[in-house]
Amino acid sequence: MKTSIAASVALAALFTGAAQASTPIVVDLIGSTGGTLSAGISHTISTAGSFEDIYTLTGYNGPSSVNGALSTLILNSGSSDIDISSVTLNGASFSQSLIAYRGNPDGRELYALPASSFNGALTLVVKGTLVAGHNGSSVGTYSASFRVTPTSPVPEPQTYALFAAGLAAVAFVARRRRSA
């Protein structure tokens, strides 16, 4: 009996510091068919601790060039601070810039993804921690924007080889018919 109580206490302690994981959030890309699509995200976190937010960008599921940006901002010194540890799109990491703001060395965090090629569904993962402020506040917000430009797939070398073989076969048949 003592072992099961100790195990329960240890398990509860383990989950107390666990990350707050959200269910995937669907974000629709908007724009014209065949043209550039865009999406915007704004998320407010109101519980101090670790978090992981997962977004699925829907509306286009093919080859594309994507660029995006994400930023945070604290309101004033003493308030809560949102610290992003990583931002990825389909596993590609965003670059990070930290800017001091109102006495906080990372008061404004900027993340950027330069134009990158993707093929298929797009999944954004944002991981970080919301640190409660001295004034008891536990609210942090980040916002992101994305631009998705559909692209034509570049043929593989095998495609060119098959095309050349087809042209050679057509030329061979045409030459044979001429000589017959």
Image (spheres, rainbow, N blue to C red):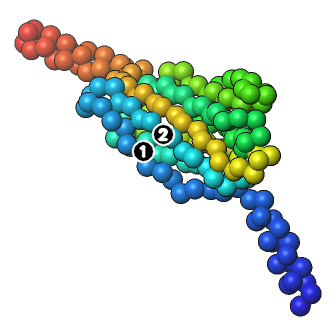
Q: Give residue 72's position: percent from left, percent from top.
A: 63, 34
Decide if residue 12 is in sight here: yes
Q: Give residue 69's position: percent from left, percent from top.
A: 54, 28
Q: What numbered label is drawn on residue 41?
A: 2
* Picture layout, residue 56 above or below residue 171: below
Q: Residue at x 57, y 31 (%)?
A: 70
Q: How many angstroms separate mark 2 from mark 1 (CA)?
A: 8 Å
Q: Give residue 176's position: percent from left, percent from top.
A: 14, 13
Quadrant location of the N terminus in the rendered image: bottom right
Q: Residue at x 63, y 53 (%)?
A: 46
Quadrant location of the C terminus in the rendered image: top left
Decide if residue 85 is in sight here: no
Q: Residue furthest right?
A: 2
Badges 2 and 1: C-beta atoms under 8 Å apart? yes
What amino acid is found at the position of numbered circle 2 in the picture? Ile
In this rendering, would 12 be left or right of 138? right
Pick whichever, 61 or 28, lies toward us. 28
Q: Residue at x 74, y 24 (%)?
A: 100
In this rendering, would 91 be left or right of 4? left
* Picture layout, residue 3 above or below residue 55: below
What amino acid is found at the position of numbered circle 1 in the picture? Val
Q: Residue at x 10, y 8 (%)?
A: 179
* Picture layout, residue 4 above or below residue 76: below
Pick whichever, 92 or 172, lies toward us. 92
Q: What numbered label is drawn on residue 27?
A: 1
* Label 1 environment density (alpha carbons within 10 Å; few <14, some 14–19, many ≥20): some
